[in-house]
Structure formats: structure tokens, C-alpha cells
Image (cartoon, rainbow, N blue to C red):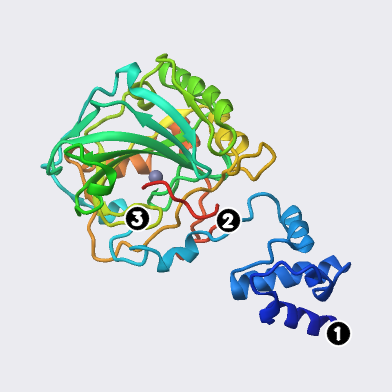
Amino acid sequence: MAPFTHLFSCTFSPAYYGFCLGTSDLHCGGPFAFWGMLCQFFRFLVLRQPNMCSPSLITMLLVFGSSFSWPGPDTWSSQGHCNGKRQSPIDIVTSSVRHNPKLGAVTLTGYNDTKKLLEMKNTGKTVDIELGEGLQLSGPGLPATYTAKAFHLHWGDGVHKPGSEHYINGERYSMELHIVHTKNNTSLSEALKDPQGIAVLAFFVQGYEKAQGKTAEAWELFKKKLKDVEEKGEETKFDGSFSLQDLLGRPELDRYYRYPGSLTTPGCDEVVLWTIFADPILVSEDVVHAFPNELHSTDSSTGPHIENNYRPLQNIGDRKVESSAALKHKSAATIASPPQELAEALLVPTNVTLDGTFTRVSSTAENTHSP
Ligand SMILES: [Zn+2]
């Protein structure tokens, strides 16, 4: 049979669908790895189901590197609410936001308590940090007091491939930290039933070679803990040497954007009030590199790295992003002309092209953490 016929039959034949047939690679080209790999590629495109036992698949993974995985966010549309009209993340275009003079500073209680950072776990998709009881968030525009449950991060592939989920004016930052709170201290599952059940505080984290001070030091300590959770499922306890507040630095809690959105992982529940702080936390570039380089998405230290664990941009639709009182005028000026030194740190490459279309470099497998 001609190679093209082999390729066609091994891609579409039901005999291969979902089975690990010992002869499949023979039919797909056998020793001819090129045809085998093409077959796997077409099978993935057409059937979304590669032959998991195939030597060609293994070869292909080796060829394309550890970041290749499936199914990514582009396959989520059928899951939960992921195809809804109130999805996150979004690009915040500051010229289009609605200034709300009633949005003053948020109030954080207990965030400076070093005993509240309990445990960090590698979930295979991110690191999730469990928080102790008593960290509370309140403020203008929030319908209740919210209690912090946990935080996690999203990142790209190091400093030069940033991986924040939200964008500001088409620019993204190295990483994004999400502190997940539930309304009136309900459980996460209860919060999912309320359209305002979850409040997320989002902080941009930017790699900066000159980062120093107490915040940068806290992130160095945090980075060291990553070594304890390199493999999926591993957990480590914190020793009380720093607090969540130490990681956040001294954020200007009156400079933020607010909009209604969703979890950024399936089922993309539309229950989140997002508060996205305008000013990034500056950390050393080593810290930014550590996340994709040290963490693995399987329970093996030779497994794929966790990288690019962000969801692509979603349509804003007819929603309006509000800016806080302190961001009037100041926001546009700050973003347009930051101090020279900081501008250097903040001008990072993005995946957004000039015509506004989004191109994703790669994606991790399906995420199950939230949001
Ligand atoms: Zn998140």
C-alpha cells in the first residue's frame, strides 16, 4: 500500500480508534517513524484520540518536547459553562473601562499572619497553597465579606514567555497570582451556586532583574519550597517564615479593576467577582524561571514540566470593566509612561498580534484547579 493510503487508513480506521493494537505502527508506517508520527498527528486532529501505546506517539512526544499535551483549553467549550458569555480571563483595555468613584480600597484582614500559609501542593496543573482560617476580604462593590481559602499561580515558560491570564492593554505579565475567596466563608461547592459566590484577588507578578527588598526575599523563600513539590501530588508545609502579605508586598489596594467573570478552568462557572490590581509584584527572574523549570505535571521527576498553564483570552461581550476611584487618569498615565527602569521590566512580549487575534504558544492538559 502506498504510504498515503497507510496514512489515511490508520488515521480514520475504526480498528485503531481507542485500541492499542500491536500492529498499528506497522500499518502506520512501522519502522518509518515519519509516517507513524504523521498518522498520530492526524489522529489527534481528527479523532482527538491518539493511540497511547504507539511507539510513534512516544517518538512524536520526544520530538515535539514535553510541553505538548492535550486536551487543552480549546477543547473546553463543551465542558460546564466554558462556552458562556461571562468568561475569564479578558484583556482589560484601559481606555474602555468605566471609572467608578465609589470603588475605594479593599480591606484585607489577617494576610500578614505568618501562620496562615499552611501547605503547598503540586496539583499537576499549578501549585495550590492552602490558607488557614481568618483571612478576610471586604470592600466597596463586594456584596459581603469573603474568606480566603487558597491561592495558586499561572505562568508561562519563563521571563521571556509570560503567562499571566489577564492582559492590560494587550500586555501580559510573567505570572498571575489568584487568591480564591468564598462569600461568607461557604464551601467552594456552595459558592459555585451563587453568581457572586467567589471573589478572586488577582496580582500580576513580573520578573525583574533588579527586584530586591522584603517582597523579593519572601519570593526567594517561596521558590525554595517548590523543590519539595516537584512532582504531581507532592505536598509541603510552610514553616511560618513569611506571610501572604510578604508575598504581595505593599500593594496599592485602591488601584484595581473589577468585573464579573468566571473560573478559568472547567467548568468555568460564572460566579467570580474579579479584582485585578494594577501594579505588579516584582520578583527576581530566577523566581519566574523556577515555576516552569522545577514543577512537573506527573508524579515523575522526568515527566513534562508545568508550563503555560493559563487560559486564552475570552470575549468581554457586553460586560464593562470598572476601574477604582484611584485609577482615574492616573491609570492611563501610569501604563503609558512608567518609570524608565520599571518600563524595561514591564515591556514583555505578548502573544497578541497587531490585529488583536490571539495566538497561543502551547497549553497544558486540562486544568482542574480553580479558578
Ligand atoms: Zn487561577
Q: Residue at label 3?
A: 88
Where residue 220 appears, as percent x and y from the top left, is 51, 21
Can you say whether 217 is above or below 33 in the image?
above
Dot 2: what SS?
loop
Identified by mark 3, the residue type is Ser
Q: Is residue 353 left or right of residue 334?
A: right
Residue for point 30% across, 28% down: 251
Q: Is residue 79 left or right of residue 52?
A: left
Dot 3: what SS?
loop
**Which quadrant would residue 93 be assigned to in this image?**
bottom left
Identified by mark 2, the residue type is Val
Task: Report if residue 122 is visible in the image.
Answer: yes
Asked if disc 3 and disc 2 are in contact, CB closer than 8 Å, the reply is no
Residue for point 37% across, 31% down: 130
Q: CA distance from mark 3 to mark 2?
A: 19 Å
Q: Is residue 58 left or right of residue 131?
A: right
Q: Residue at label 1?
A: 2
**Which quadrant would residue 131 be assigned to in this image?**
top left
Query: How many discs appear?
Result: 3
